[in-house]
Amino acid sequence: MIRKFLRHVFRRGAPSMPHAPAKIPVARHGIRRERVSVGARRTCEALQHAGHKAYIVGGAVRDLIAGIEPKDYDIATDATPEQVRSLFRRARIIGRRFQIVHVMQGGETLEVSTFRAAHDAHTVKDEHGRVLRDNVFGSIAEDAARRDFTVNALYYDPATETVIDYHDGVADLKQKTLRMIGEPTQRYREDPVRMLRAVRLSAKLGLTLDPAVRAPIREMAELMENVPAARMFDEMLKLLFSGHSVECLKRLRDDGLHHGLLPLLDVILEQPLGEKFVMLSLASTDARVKAGKSLSPGYLFATLLWHEVLAAWEARKAKGDVPIPALYEAMDEVLDMQAEKLAITRRIVGDIKDIWALQPRFEKRAGKSPYRLIELPRFRAGYDFLVLRAESGEIDMELATWWHDFQNADHEAREAMLVPDSGPKKRRRRVRGKKSAGEGDAVVSASSEA
Ligand code: ATP
Ligand code: MG
């Protein structure tokens, strides 16, 4: 009894305490080495051949057991980054916070990291307990203990087809439970991003959050504020491009996790007008992920924030601002608000703005304008965005259909489609003055009335 209790305490309370791992044979976990990518197998073989330990670790092992094709492979080894690099022809050391080695095998890139130790009393933390640095090499047991969830701490050896399991991860996976290694509140304090990871991984794998994993989230969500904006952006991208974004967001909402967590999430989940638009966009993103199609972060973020832009734009126009400059100001306002918490990279910000700025131009169906528009490199993205706006009911479907037909028509048919221009060029120069009803801003009326 006492021994059992102690074992329980050591497992849960002191994750770095090494204990003998379970060695699970292929009959129980089901991963035959043929299912593992050739590059991952070769990398492990080469390391082992040189006398090192080497395992496939983390998400790939978890996904293979769950019957999901891993999107990439991580390898853990007791070789140092220098030793790893010296063993491969095409390998380079990357990373500042913690060095890892990228090994190229055929078209694959394998991420090889040296076993890392869990932090101790000397670990550098911020005032909220967030770990700032954890770059001490360690044993495989320590490496397992510093990982977040039991299902993520599995080590697969392709040579023997065994899984090394320190924290009952295989059993948890089979029972469809996401359980934390160690004490959840402490692990969230060390790295608040684990809360988002819990939601994302549970959605991806169809796992139930262990009550101890789920319960503290609502209260601790505010710790996410201290996470650097660049890291937050990476995690949000992972979540949105997981192929399960709709499910992730549903779970976030159910857990009350979106409140104040990120302005972006409030935007996504709390705008009645934009909800249909955002959900359509996320559903189509999920479908694209599942079909293995390319993804554009700029397009997705443009959809997520569009109704914010519409609202800010509307407010400016109501004050009497000139429509097009007002749109640009509204765009900046919305992006600046996100920037504090979420460091959207500059290139992506450029893509987002391009897509938004194109929208009023779809209203112009006269003269040379439509011809110029379809030649623009961003036309396709802008058009897809327009269709989504129509599908969500924000604008009339007629406009999207017109552009569909215009693209597919020959020159003669296009000429016939052009809507006679009501405002000759002369009027355009008069923008600053008071507009005669509907003239000056006919260009943007449809989108602004939504
Ligand atoms: P995905 O399928 O999205 O790649 P993943 O679990 O592989 O999921 P990665 O970000 O690729 O996620 O991380 C690889 C592994 O590193 C994880 O499986 C886990 O063992 C460990 N890990 C990642 N992030 C954390 C974290 N915040 N805290 C502790 N361990 C982590
Ligand atoms: Mg991974």
Image: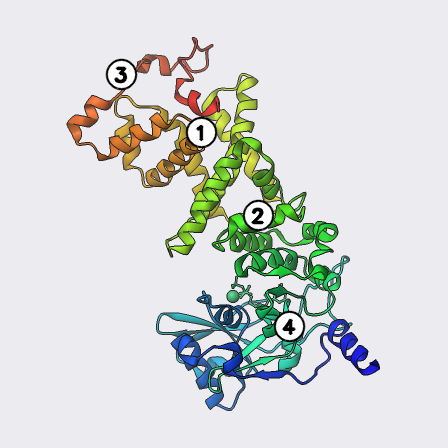
Question: What whole-number distance in Å separates the C-alpha atoms at marks 3 and 4?
Answer: 67 Å
Q: Is residue 371 above or below residue 285?
A: above
User: Which residue corresponds to the image point at 40% horizontal and 51% vertical from the top-left?
Assistant: 288
Q: CA distance from mark 3 to mark 1?
A: 26 Å
Of the residues under marks 1 and 4, which one precedes in the sequence? 4
Q: Amino acid at mark 1?
A: Gly
Within 10 Å of disc 4 (Cα), the crowding (few <14, some 14-19, many 20+) is some
x%, y% of residue 259? 67, 43
Considering depth in this image, is 258 or 170 the residue closer to the camera?
170
Query: What residue did someone put label 3 on?
Result: 420
Mark 2 or mark 3: which comes first in sequence?
2
Q: Position of residue 156 (x, y in %)?
A: 52, 79
Q: Which mark is residue 320?
A: none
Residue type beneath disc 3: Pro
Q: Answer above or below: position of 405 versus 27.
A: above
| Mark 1 or mark 2: whose residue is earlier in sequence | 2
Residue most toward the left? 412
- Disc 2 crowd rating (10 Å Cα; few below 14, some 14-19, many 20+) is many
Looking at the rendered image, the disc whose residue lies closer to the viewer, 3 or 1, is 1
Of tags 1 and 4, which is closer to the observer?
1
Q: Residue furthest right?
A: 2
- Amino acid at pointer 2: Leu
Residue in the image at 56% along x and 55% along y: 235
Image coords of residue 316 (percent x, y): 55, 23
Residue matched to label 1: 393
**228, 382: nearer the viewer:** 382
Q: Secondary structure at mark 2?
A: helix
